[in-house]
Image: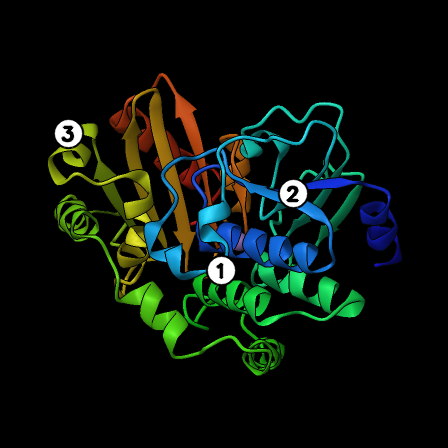
């Protein structure tokens, strides 16, 4: 905490950045940190490499401030919810980085790494840090709360514990609106996201006595539905929700290869994500592979699940 304070004090400018293809935890945490720094009178900018940011988050304070490029030349970088430096998407070579995250596979690429693998969201890590140093405003609390309910799937994930309700209650006390925020996040889906959900569920395949479920989304489906990558958020959870399923996998064809999302009901799949060059948490992760087709990738993943004895 002391170290964090000293590092931010020693910089004139700060750039807050989160991972490519950001989810609500990435955006919420970075906006919460951005608002907090701004309130301290610090020159700060908030950036994300991806142009397609989930639009339903536009109710968050300062959402419109998120830029695609870093303007400050010699700023301190504060990265949020980003497990490895390449996932920032920007060239930050030579810059000091403070790394705020909760990915089990975080590579500790910062000069200061505030990484708590047990935290349910990066916003939990950021909130616990910042509240020790200065007041957390309604704006920050709103962004942190949105991130918290998203990464815990509305307080239903395996890593939940009573301390999270204390944090949620503190955030509400600070001004986060616990009725409006979920309303904005759950009831403002795009038509394309429902169309692609339908198409994805049509593709459902079951393996190993229904213990593994697979969804496959090819480029044609994305084009016909008009869906963007951000419209795919949460779809793999449907494949996981089937009673028999232990591990759910979604394969999405990209212009350069395949993007894979992995989820489990309890089996540790972090090693599986890492094996294919990705990362994540014990029950949620993913990776991207270049120059490969969905069918081949799917066989490889099924084989690796078998080799590792993850499903017996
Ligand atoms: Mn997260």
In the figure, 295 relative to 131: above or below? above
Q: State the image coordinates of residue 75 (x, y, percent, origin top left).
A: 73, 34
Does the residue tagged 2 have its C-beta within 8 Å of any atom of ligand 1?
no
Which element type, helix, strand or loop, lies under badge 3? helix
In the figure, 174 relative to 205: above or below? below
Judging depth in this view, the residue of 218 and 53 nearest the camera is 53
Q: Is residue 86 left or right of residue 13?
A: left
Q: Nearer the viewer, mark 1 or mark 3?
A: 1
Q: State the image coordinates of residue 223 (x, y, percent, origin top left).
A: 16, 32
Which element type, helix, strand or loop, lies under badge 1? loop
Decide which of tag 1 and tag 3 comes sooner along the chain. 1
Q: Which residue bears the numbered disc 1?
A: 61
Judging depth in this view, the residue of 209 and 71 nearest the camera is 71
Which element type, helix, strand or loop, lies under badge 2? loop
Q: CA distance from mark 3 to mark 2?
A: 34 Å
Total labels: the figure holds 3
Q: Residue furthest top?
A: 291
Task: Quarter of the image for the N terminus: give it.
Answer: bottom right
Residue at 68 percent across and 60 percent down: it is 39
Residue at 41 percent across and 66 percent down: it is 153
Q: CA distance from mark 1 to mark 2?
A: 28 Å
On the question of residue 268 being in view, the answer is no
Q: State the image coordinates of residue 107 (x, y, percent, origin top left).
A: 68, 38
Decide which of tag 3 and tag 2 comes sooner along the chain. 2
Q: Nearer the viewer, mark 1 or mark 2?
A: 1
Q: Is residue 226 left or right of residue 22?
A: left
Label 1–label 2 contact, CB within 8 A: no
Residue at 72 percent across and 71 percent down: it is 135
Q: Is residue 158 left or right of residue 30?
A: left
Q: Which residue bears the numbered disc 2?
A: 106
Q: State the image coordinates of residue 276 (x, y, percent, origin top left).
A: 49, 31
Q: Which residue bears the numbered disc 3?
A: 220
């Amino acid at each position: 905490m002391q170290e964090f304070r000293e590092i931010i004090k020693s910089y004139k400018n700060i750039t807050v950045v989160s991972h490519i293809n950001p989810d609500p935890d990435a955006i919420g945490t970075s906006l919460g940190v951005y608002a907090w720094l701004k309130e301290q009178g610090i020159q700060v900018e908030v950036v994300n490499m991806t142009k397609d940011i989930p639009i339903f988050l536009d109710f968050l304070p300062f959402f419109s401030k998120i830029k695609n490029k870093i303007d400050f030349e010699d700023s301190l970088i504060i990265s949020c919810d980003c497990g490895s430096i390449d996932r920032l998407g920007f060239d930050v070579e030579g810059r000091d980085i403070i790394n705020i995250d909760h990915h089990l596979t975080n590579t500790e690429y910062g000069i200061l790494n505030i990484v708590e693998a047990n935290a349910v969201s990066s916003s939990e890590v950021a909130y616990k840090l910042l509240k020790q140093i200065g007041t957390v405003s309604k704006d920050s609390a709103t962004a942190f709360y949105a991130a918290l309910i998203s990464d815990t799937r509305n307080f239903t994930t395996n890593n939940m514990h009573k301390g999270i309700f204390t944090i949620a209650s503190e955030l509400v006390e600070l001004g986060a609106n616990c009725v409006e925020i979920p309303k904005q996040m759950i009831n403002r889906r795009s038509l394309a996201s429902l169309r692609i959900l339908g198409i994805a569920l049509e593709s459902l395949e079951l393996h190993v006595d229904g213990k593994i479920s697979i969804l496959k989304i090819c480029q044609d489906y994305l084009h016909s539905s008009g869906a963007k990558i951000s419209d795919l958020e949460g779809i793999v959870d449907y494949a996981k929700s089937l009673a028999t399923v232990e591990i759910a996998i979604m394969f999405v064809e990209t212009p350069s290869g395949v993007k894979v999302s992995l989820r489990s009901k309890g089996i540790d799949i972090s090693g599986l994500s890492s094996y294919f060059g990705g990362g994540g948490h014990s029950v949620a992760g993913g990776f991207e592979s270049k120059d490969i087709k969905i069918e081949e990738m799917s066989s490889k993943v099924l084989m690796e699940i078998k080799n590792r004895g993850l499903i017996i």
